Image (cartoon, helix red, strand yellow):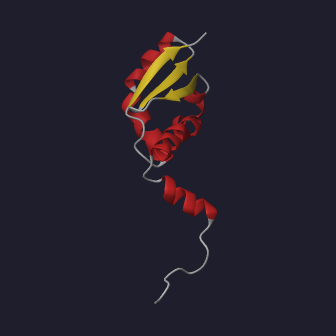
Amino acid sequence: MSDDRKGPAKVGDALAELLAGSALGARIARAAVLGHWAGAVGPQIAAVTQARAIAENGTLTVSVKTNAWVQELSMMERALIAKVNKSAGSDVVKKIRWEVYR
């Protein structure tokens, strides 16, 4: 009987493996996107926006300072989704919902 393990598994690796296919793992991946927003979109866009929440269907809610920015960012939505997903390492974001905050 041979044991192919090379030693004890790292806790982080074991936890990642456990969560990989679970609903909790999917929720964690979605939540992590919020932390990737500012770095993915760059300082100019990050200065006028804030990622607020992400729904199970992949809709990311982003607060924006002005209506003019909402219009501008709406035209850039596909590119922004691609940048955020690339930064997060998964295709979690499917759509962005823009809302003006005051």
Q: Is residue 20 above or below residue 77?
A: below
Location of residue 24 in the rendering, given as x and y in whole percent from the top left corner:
50, 44
Q: Is residue 69 visible?
A: no
Percent coordinates x, y for residue 60 in the rendering: 46, 28
Q: Nearer the viewer, residue 11 or 90?
A: 11
Which residue is painted at 60% across and 79% down in the image?
Answer: 7
Question: Which of the 4 image quadrants contains residue 94?
Answer: top left
Q: Residue at x 43, y 16 (%)?
A: 71
Q: Quadrant of the C terminus?
A: top right
Instruction: Name above or below for residue 71 compared with residue 32.
Output: above
Looking at the picture, how far across and down is residue 89, in whole percent?
47, 49
Q: Position of residue 67 (x, y in %)?
A: 49, 11
Q: From the viewer's perspective, tell me whether residue 21 is left or right of residue 64.
A: left
Residue found farthest to the bottom: 1
Q: Hey, which residue is sitting farthest front in the picture?
A: 1
Identify the residue at horizontal 54%, vertical 12% (top origin): 66
Q: Quick check: 27 left or right of 57?
A: right
**Towards the viewer: 85 or 65:** 85
Q: How many marks?
A: 0
Residue at image x 38%, y 31%?
Answer: 57
